[in-house]
Image (cartoon, rainbow, N blue to C red):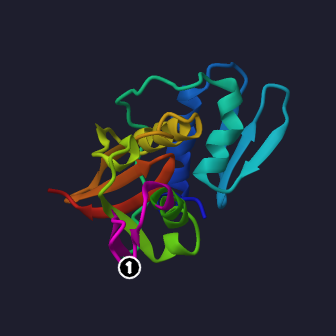
Amino acid sequence: MDWSRRWFTDLAARSAAATAVTRLVARPGVRVVAASGGWVVIGPTGATTMCGGLGELVAAVRPWGPAVPEFAAESSGRLSVAPREAREGVVLRVDPAGNGPFIVPDEESGLRVLGELAAMPWSLRYYLLGVTGVTAAWGLAGEPLTGPAPDAVVWLEWARQAGEFDAGAVTLTCRLGEGSVLDVEIRAGHVVRAREKVAA
């Protein structure tokens, strides 16, 4: 399941994402059109690709753009209002002597759990609140980013697919509306948290 799907459920949000991703494409003749349930990418030769999620959309257009685009504070529109968060936040703990849910004996096992948290079925039930007992870069505090949605979300997925966060961690905060923000965290290349929360 695409980690950002819940914020692109309506046509206005998908149209905004189409504008945002087109800004990152360097080659003329590439068009992105919002469609029912996703997007259509039209390449320079006229070939079309149907994309059902943001991950597919970014993967389809990346060949015509820079490896990692410059992070720009532009806004192409708004995101959808997501359903109320029903998942459980968990803390991943690396502790050779520990025992219990989300407690693992070593960092290698911790990386495996990160991958499971980012994929179904765990991603439907849990999101990561924090990590303890890890000395590797992926377990340290993430580099904080802020920016307007959906442009910052599109850039984040582009950079993630390019491998920018494979060894470390990054967090993105985007204001969604009155009193709420989108809170995304990536560790070791995995989106381990994507939720809407009350703005601080």
Does residue 61 sit above or below 84 in this rendering? Answer: above
Up the image or down, 29 lies above or below 103; here it is above
The residues colored magenta run 86-109
Q: Nearer the viewer, residue 108 or 114?
A: 108
Mark 1 sits on what residue?
86
The count of marks equals 1
Residue 65, by quadrant, is top right
Query: In x, y percent, where is residue 28?
Result: 69, 19
Q: Is residue 3 left or right of residue 149?
A: right
- The N terminus, quarter of image: bottom right
* Residue plotted at (37% across, 53% down): 184
Is 103 magenta? The answer is: yes
- Is 21 included in the stretch rendered in magenta? no
Q: Residue 148: percent from the left, percent from the top?
A: 34, 40
Q: Which residue does the image show at 34% across and 30% down from the upper left?
A: 73
Amino acid at the residue labelled 1? Ala
Q: Residue 79, located in which quarter of the rendered image? A: bottom left
- The residue most toward the front is 97
Residue occupying image coordinates x 21% and y 58%: 178
Q: Nearer the viewer, residue 108 or 185?
A: 108
Which of 44/163 is in front? Answer: 163
Where does the image place residue 144, in percent across and percent down from the top left?
28, 40
Q: Secondary structure at mark 1?
A: loop
Left or right for 119, reference 44: left
The residue drawn where x is 40% and y is 59% is 193
92 or 170, nearer to the observer: 92
Image quadrant occupied by the C terminus: bottom left
**Residue 165 coordinates in the image, percent (x, y):** 47, 39
Q: Count residues near mark 1 (Cα–Cα under 10 Å), then give few for <14, some for 14-19, many for 20+.
A: few
